[in-house]
Amino acid sequence: VVSIRDGYERGLHFEKGHNIGGLTEIESDSANSTYFCFKYDDEVFENTNISYDFAKEQLHRLAILNTGVTFNLTYEAEDITHKDTFVYQGGVREYLEELLSGHEHTEIFDGECTYTGRDKVRFNEYTANLRILFSFCKDKSQINTFHNYNLLCWNGDHTDRVVQIIQNLLNYLHRGSKLTKREIKEHLVLFVVTNTSRAYSRWNDEGQRSLGNEMLVDMVREAMNENFMKNMYYNDELF
């Protein structure tokens, strides 16, 4: 690990979980940046056969969630070398716009909030960040939930609340309609991004594939504020 900050380059080297040689420090005129070099040790890892597609997917996701940070991938295996660069200056929103490009879709809703509290009385207070972006698309659907830079394959209770609020408002605006969540999801492109201290994530399952955090559920309505209501009310394309 090499970190360049304020005219100094500081580095740490690890082998088999132990620091080797301590902290190194030299002067540097390079721009502030951080570098990670990681080599799998077959004495530590049972499987060191990491596919190119897996490595590409991981760095692509990190680029989406770290606005403006450039991730360079060099993958070498069996006389084949792949080189890729991932960067999204507009972060998650830019990626959403990329997905929707060329497809008929509604205006993107983008709402976020930060809240300090607790999801149950007996738990300690902590701070959570929540961002919700979505659009309705005629021929595309996708729902992604990211928590602490990880993609949750089973989403979470807070993501279900987003869909529920959209369902309730659409059915309210069109009295007599009975749109189901399934019908809404068929045309919904939705990203829900959250960050909390890892200790306060609150999982629905042992595999950490779905969040059950009650405070995040309560934060959804705050993030989907009056701008969301205006977006839904005035955007005739939805209807």
Image (cartoon, rainbow, N blue to C red):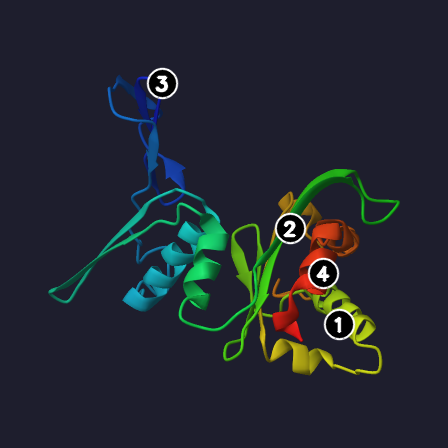
Q: Quadrant of the N terminus?
A: top left
Q: Residue furthest left?
A: 79
Left or right placement of residue 57 versus residue 141 in this view: left
Q: Position of residue 97 (x, y in %)?
A: 45, 60
Mark nearer the N terminus (3 vs 2): 3
Q: Earlier in the sequence, mark 2 or mark 1?
A: 2
Badge 1: residue crowd in 10 Å (few <14, some 14–19, many ≥20): some
Q: Amino acid at mark 4?
A: His
| Percent position of residue 119, x then y | 81, 49
Q: Is residue 64 visible?
A: yes
Q: Nearer the viewer, mark 3 or mark 1?
A: 1
**Circle 2 crowding by C-alpha within 10 Å: few under 14, some 14–19, many from 20:** some
Type of amino acid under label 1: Leu
**How far is the residue under mark 2 from the one under mark 1?**
18 Å
Q: Which residue is mark 2?
A: 111
Where, by quadrant of the figure, is residue 46 drawn? bottom left
3D distance between C-alphas at marks 1 and 4: 19 Å
Q: Is residue 2 visible?
A: no
**What residue is drawn where x is 74% and y is 58%?**
229
User: Residue 131, which numbered label?
Assistant: none
Report the residue marked by disc 4: 158
Q: Which image quarter holds the C terminus?
A: bottom right
